[in-house]
Image (tube, coloured by chain):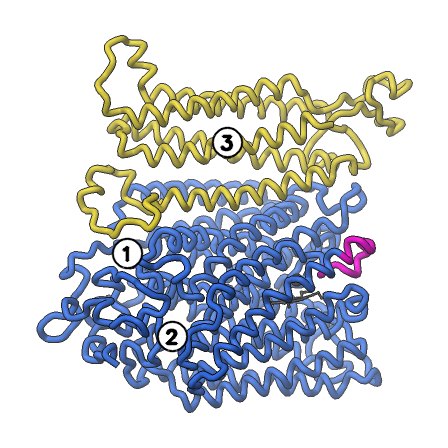
Chain colours: A yellow, B blue
């Protein structure tokens, strides 16, 4: 974080008279690993709370079950509720097909991030001749793809949140609503930070071009991005898939 | 000793460090930041101590009316919160900052500006928590802030808001510092400074940083839930909505027990530096000390529910947590045996620092033993929530952490300031503190066993508690006398104490090879380390090559003359810290029902913060 590497790495390298680091790794890389370790505990606490509170809400709507408000009955299917007026009937909230799609999008963004890093590492290699090869070798391309996929994921989340609210679940409704929105909201905030980070890298790329000497900066952003992705895999499995 | 080349250090302060308030606001030097932590924490120590004096005055006899129940709640809450988060933790931070780079042979921490940021965030967080007491609005839910009693339904005032927001802010400070120190220790060791050659203080600090990064996120989450419950109407702690009344307790103590090791391990580290020096013997069983420290850190995450034996977790959980708690006493006991063995047969010099060090070994043992007593869950049912527990944790926190830190202050004061503290006043301070602490806290064991509960603002006569309370109150006032002696010694010695040489104690670790006070670049040449006790095994001149550091007239060369790049001073960390605090505190206006104002302040602070961070990240470090 506190390093002159962002303004211009070549310049910083000249003025370098610091002793080499003990491990040979850059300080920031180690700090980011420590940060990720800490973030793990954050998400472990949030996810555990969700799981502890699963099934403890005294009123619906519920994640995977149908709910009749009038009689406060729960069922695996709408039929199990017996006779229940439509206005009193609440569907299961979680929409697995939609979220599978958004999960796929986020996974693909990790792939794009890997390609972005590779592009920066190879930025000094001679330019290929074809236009397409050029586009596929450009760090700008893959940073944009990553950022756009990340934003798409956030779009899915915004859609999910609004539709849940329409289906009768807000952060205040019940324990499920409180713990679900808090957990996924925290994750979404992390994705947002990641997208902003990517945009900042793009800004530098347009200004002066990302060189192999910048690989570390991109690498650190990538570490964070993959971490956020892995957390989502955990959330998707534990909240959505396991019923 | 060859290291006592006094003329070198005599003028060093004048040559390199600028003074004036601005230089302190913009400093990124780890040593100055360490001193800022120290001075701030000593201030809060006095503040928290005054709160304790009011508490003890109220309890001196039955049915006293100095304060009412509400004021009493605020006082004990703030006393605990202050001592834990604003005194012992920052006192430890003072030493992390000052010592870690010097002990491992580095010129600064890995991220000097982030380090300054941590300090300012700590200071502002401390102010947010402390100031409200002046308006009678201080937090009043205990230092453990049990929800649901701290939710809006039961605590609708602003009091708890300050506590929640203040702790969140302080958490940011601790986490940022922990990332910094972890990186520093892993990555900035001088050549030859292998992990198993690191001074024990650095080792214990290293363990503590891991405890911080793993434990603080848990309380952050617990506080976020509480904040959302209070401000946005979520249900995490609403029992009527099906919430688990123990959720907060679990989250809090999963943080809380590692936290007590966060408080004690740095003091253990300091004492492990002091005892070998004044016994003229290497630390007994260095590797065992390291591994027991790690084991304590590890097991510390598996004992939290010993704070919850009375909530009815059931026999299985109670037994498991009883066992893990008894288990953790083993590595703790190992440390005590190692300290005793270090002194055994040594050539002991009874300096003030050493006396505090020895007192830690003895007093911590007393606290450890009462700890083992309530690790047995049936026994704990008699003791929990009584003054017996108050006695336990004051023996470990005062007799342990504070005594250890005092040993560290007397020991490192010469390195920090270039001057010696008065040993005569120091000895007075020690004996007054030692007697006062036992007079205050020992009777509490009996008061507790006679049934006196914690956190009561007054009591009726005739229950057999009077004598013990009189003793405790007398002890508390005596502690205040000790504190005054310390302050007097601290201030006068800083002004006009005798000049200290590089190594006044004949100590073995690397930091003592440097001039006192240390020049801003620490090491003109990064030394090569060949043993655990370089100054006992290597010549100091070999380590730091001091002749090339001085000019002809005997003054220390500046960083510029030596061609060492130094980080620029900058005000950005302070501004970033301030804006982050106003951003977090803007939610207070939601409680006041003024959403637009909350949003305005929040968004304005956020934009300012972003701007500051961009300018921070794009400005050159050095
Ligand atoms: C031998 C090691 C230790 C053992 C076995 C132990 C055991 C315990 C137990 C079982 C309790 C719960 C008592 C109750 O509330 O009924 C307790 C409370 C406490 N312990 Fe320890 N402890 C040990 C060391 C420490 C250390 C090193 C510290 C801090 C430096 C510490 C600080 C505290 C505090 C602050 C509390 C009270 C928390 C509260 O209720 O506000 N303990 N200890
Ligand atoms: Cu504990």
**Where in the image, quadrant-wise, is ligand 1 located?**
bottom right
- Determine the residue positioned at 54% across, 77% down: B360
Please identify the dominant SS of the magenta region. helix
Residue named by callout 3:
A191
Q: Which residues are magenta?
A: B306-319
Query: For numbered disc 1, what is the local secondary structure?
Result: loop
Q: Position of residue A159 (x, y in %)?
A: 60, 22
- Using the numbered discs, state the Cα–Cα distance from disc 3 to disc 2 in whole angstroms: 45 Å
Q: Say which quarter of the image contains residue A64.
A: top right
Q: Say which quarter of the image contains residue A62.
A: top right
Q: Is residue B525 left or right of residue B188?
A: left
Give residue B569's mark: 1
Q: Is residue B251 left or right of residue A158?
A: right
Q: Position of residue B140 (x, y in %)?
A: 67, 63
Dot 3 crowding, Cα within 10 Å, few <14, some 14–19, many 20+: many
Residue A154 within the segment the image draws in magenta = no
Are both tags, 1 and 3, on one chain?
no
Dot 1 crowding, Cα within 10 Å, few <14, some 14–19, many 20+: many
Q: Is residue B416 left or right of residue B294?
A: left
Q: Position of residue A234 (x, y in %)?
A: 60, 32
What chain is tagged by disc 3? Answer: A
Residue named by callout 2:
B412
Query: For numbered disc 3, what is the local secondary structure?
Result: helix
Viewer can see residue B592: no
């Amino acid at each position: 974080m506190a390093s002159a590497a962002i303004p211009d790495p070549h310049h910083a390298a000249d003025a370098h008279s610091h002793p080499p680091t003990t491990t040979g790794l850059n300080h920031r890389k180690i700090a980011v690993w420590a940060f990720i370790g800490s973030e793990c505990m954050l998400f472990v606490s949030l996810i555990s709370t969700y799981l502890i509170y699963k099934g403890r809400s005294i009123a619906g709507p519920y994640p995977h079950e149908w709910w009749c408000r009038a009689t406060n009955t729960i069922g695996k299917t709408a039929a199990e509720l017996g006779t229940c007026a439509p206005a009193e009937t609440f569907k299961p909230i979680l929409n697995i097909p939609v979220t599978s799609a958004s999960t796929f999008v986020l996974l693909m963004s990790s792939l794009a991030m890997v390609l972005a890093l590779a592009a920066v590492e190879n930025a000094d290699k001679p330019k290929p001749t074809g236009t397409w090869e050029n586009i596929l070798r450009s760090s700008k391309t893959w940073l944009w793809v990553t950022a756009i996929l990340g934003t798409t994921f956030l779009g899915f989340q915004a859609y999910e949140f609004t539709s849940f609210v329409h289906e009768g679940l807000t952060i205040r409704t019940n324990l499920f609503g409180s713990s679900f929105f808090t957990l996924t909201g925290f994750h979404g905030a992390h994705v947002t930070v990641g997208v902003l980070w990517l945009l900042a890298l793009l800004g530098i790329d347009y200004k002066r071009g990302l060189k192999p000497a910048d690989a570390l900066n991109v690498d650190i952003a990538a570490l964070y991005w993959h971490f956020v992705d892995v957390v989502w895999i955990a959330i998707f499995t534990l909240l959505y898939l396991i019923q | 000793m060859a290291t006592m080349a006094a003329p070198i250090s005599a003028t060093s302060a004048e040559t390199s460090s600028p003074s004036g308030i601005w230089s302190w606001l913009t400093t990124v030097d780890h040593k100055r930041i360490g001193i800022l932590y120290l001075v701030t924490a000593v201030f809060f120590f006095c503040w928290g101590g005054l709160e304790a004096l009011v508490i003890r005055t109220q309890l001196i006899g039955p049915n006293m009316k100095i304060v009412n129940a509400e004021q009493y709640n605020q006082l004990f809450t703030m006393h605990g919160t202050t001592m834990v988060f604003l005194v012992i933790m920052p006192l430890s931070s003072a030493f992390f900052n000052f010592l870690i780079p010097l002990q491992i042979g580095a010129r600064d921490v890995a991220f000097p500006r982030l380090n300054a940021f941590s300090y300012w965030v700590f200071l502002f967080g401390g102010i947010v928590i402390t100031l409200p007491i002046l308006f009678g609005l201080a937090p009043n839910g205990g230092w453990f802030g049990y929800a649901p009693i701290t939710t809006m339904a039961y605590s609708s005032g602003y009091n708890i808001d300050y506590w929640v927001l203040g702790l969140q802010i302080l958490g940011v400070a601790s986490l940022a510092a922990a990332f910094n120190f972890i990186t520093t220790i892993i990555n900035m060791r001088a050549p030859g400074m292998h992990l198993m050659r690191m001074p024990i203080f650095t080792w214990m600090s290293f363990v503590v940083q891991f405890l911080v990064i793993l434990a603080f996120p848990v309380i952050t989450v617990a506080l976020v839930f509480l904040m959302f419950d209070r401000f946005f109407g979520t249900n995490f702690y609403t029992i009527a909505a099906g919430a688990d009344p123990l959720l907060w307790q679990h989250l809090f103590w999963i943080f809380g027990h590692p936290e007590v090791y966060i408080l004690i391990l740095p003091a253990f580290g300091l004492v492990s530096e002091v005892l070998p020096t004044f016994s003229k013997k290497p630390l007994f069983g260095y590797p065992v000390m390291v591994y027991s420290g790690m084991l304590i850190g590890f097991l510390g995450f598996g004992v939290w529910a010993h704070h919850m034996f009375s909530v009815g977790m059931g026999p299985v959980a109670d037994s498991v947590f009883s066992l893990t708690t008894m288990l953790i006493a083993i590595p703790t006991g190992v440390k005590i045996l190692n300290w005793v063995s270090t002194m055994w047969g040594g050539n002991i010099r009874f300096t003030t620092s050493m006396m505090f060090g020895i007192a830690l070994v003895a007093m911590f043992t007393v606290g450890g033993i009462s700890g083992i007593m309530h690790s047995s869950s049936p026994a704990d049912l008699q003791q929990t929530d009584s003054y017996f527990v108050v006695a336990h944790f004051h023996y470990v926190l005062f007799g342990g952490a504070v005594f250890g830190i005092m040993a560290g202050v007397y020991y490192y004061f010469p390195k920090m300031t270039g001057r010696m503290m008065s040993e005569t006043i120091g000895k007075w301070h020690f004996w007054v503190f030692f007697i006062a602490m036992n007079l205050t806290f020992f009777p509490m064991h009996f008061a507790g066993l006679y049934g006196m509960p914690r956190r009561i603002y007054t009591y009726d006569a005739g229950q057999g508690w009077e004598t013990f309370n009189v003793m405790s109150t007398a002890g508390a006032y005596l502690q205040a006398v000790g504190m005054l002696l310390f302050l007097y010694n601290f201030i006068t010695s800083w002004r006009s104490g005798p000049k200290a040489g590089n190594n006044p104690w004949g100590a073995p670790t690397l930091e003592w090879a440097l001039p006192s006070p240390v020049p801003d670049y620490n090491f003109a040449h990064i030394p090569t380390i060949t043993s655990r006790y370089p100054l006992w095994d290597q010549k100091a001149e070999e380590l730091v090559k001091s002749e090339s550091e001085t000019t002809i007239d005997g003054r220390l060369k500046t960083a510029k003359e030596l061609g060492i790049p130094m980080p620029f001073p900058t005000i950005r960390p302070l501004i970033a810290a301030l804006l982050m605090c106003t951003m977090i505190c803007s939610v207070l206006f939601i409680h006041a029902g003024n959403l637009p104002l909350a949003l305005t302040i929040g968004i304005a602070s956020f934009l300012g913060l972003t701007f500051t961070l961009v300018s921070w990240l794009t400005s050159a470090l050095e």
